[in-house]
Structure formats: structure tokens, C-alpha cells
Image (spheres, rainbow, N blue to C red):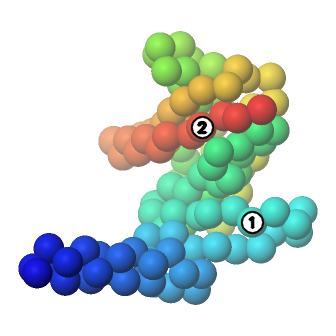
Amino acid sequence: MRTVIFAAAVAVALSAAAMPGNDGPYTTTHWTNGQYAQQSSGIVNIFPNPASDRVNITFPGLTGEATVSLIAEDGRLMRSMNIGDTRSVRSVMDIGSLENGLYLIRVVQPNGLDVTRRLMVAN
């Protein structure tokens, strides 16, 4: 009986967390290109994910300069760009020429902050 009650409680909690506008870990936003994107509410956000042509990178929890790197699953550096000031910035990285697969986006600041996010490329 406990298992049934626990399973029902988990199902209700998961369905509530997935609802748009909820304060769960993801929010759904409508972008001008007509697609919906999931945007994580962290210090570095990437969206859409999975992506096919380009990926947006925002830095709501950062200020100052940063280096953004795109790293393949095998550790190869695919792209790198320097951001002069991350405050209120949205960077767009072109990924249309990449093979399908899992990549890492790594953001490093001179103060020692090092944040990594996973990106799925699906062309």
C-alpha cells in the first residue's frame, strides 16, 4: 500500500514540476522564431537543447569577462570565444556544421569560476 501511495505522490510532483510557469527547474519561454526553448535557471544557461543550427548562451549569474568553449565528447576543442562582459549578454554559437552528438559548453572566468553544461547537437 505504501508503494502505491508513494508512486502516486511522485507522479503528481513530477507533473506539477513540468507545468509551464511553475517554479520548477525549467521554464518554458516562447521565442520570436516560433519555437519553444527550455531555459535552465542557473548562472549559465544554454538553449535550445537539443540544438541543430545555433545555441544561445546567457549568463544571468555572472559579471565580468569569460571564455566560452565548445568541447567534443572526446575532449577536442571545437570552438572558443571570449566575452568581454557577461552581464546582460546573450551569445549565439553556430553549431550547424557539427556532427550529431553530445558536447560540453565550458565557461571559465579569470576569478576561477568554471561552469560546464551539456549540449546535445541533433541536426
Q: Is residue 68 left or right of residue 98?
A: left
Query: Can see residue 92?
Result: yes
| Marks 1 and 2 in Cβ contact (< 8 Å) | no
Residue at 55% x, 21% y is 72
Residue at image position (88%, 66%) is 34
What is the three-letter code of the residue carrying label 2?
Met
What is the quadrant of the C terminus in the image? top right
Q: Position of residue 42 (x, y in %)?
A: 45, 63
- Considering only vertical position in the picture, is 24 above or below 52? below
Report whether 3 appears left or right of 75: left
Q: Amino acid at mark 1?
A: Tyr
Q: Which residue is mark 2?
A: 120
Where's residue 86, x and y in %?
A: 59, 56
Quadrant (top left, top right, bottom left, bottom right) of the N terminus: bottom left
Residue drawn where x is 49% and y is 40% of the image:
118
Name the quadrant containing residue 112.
top left
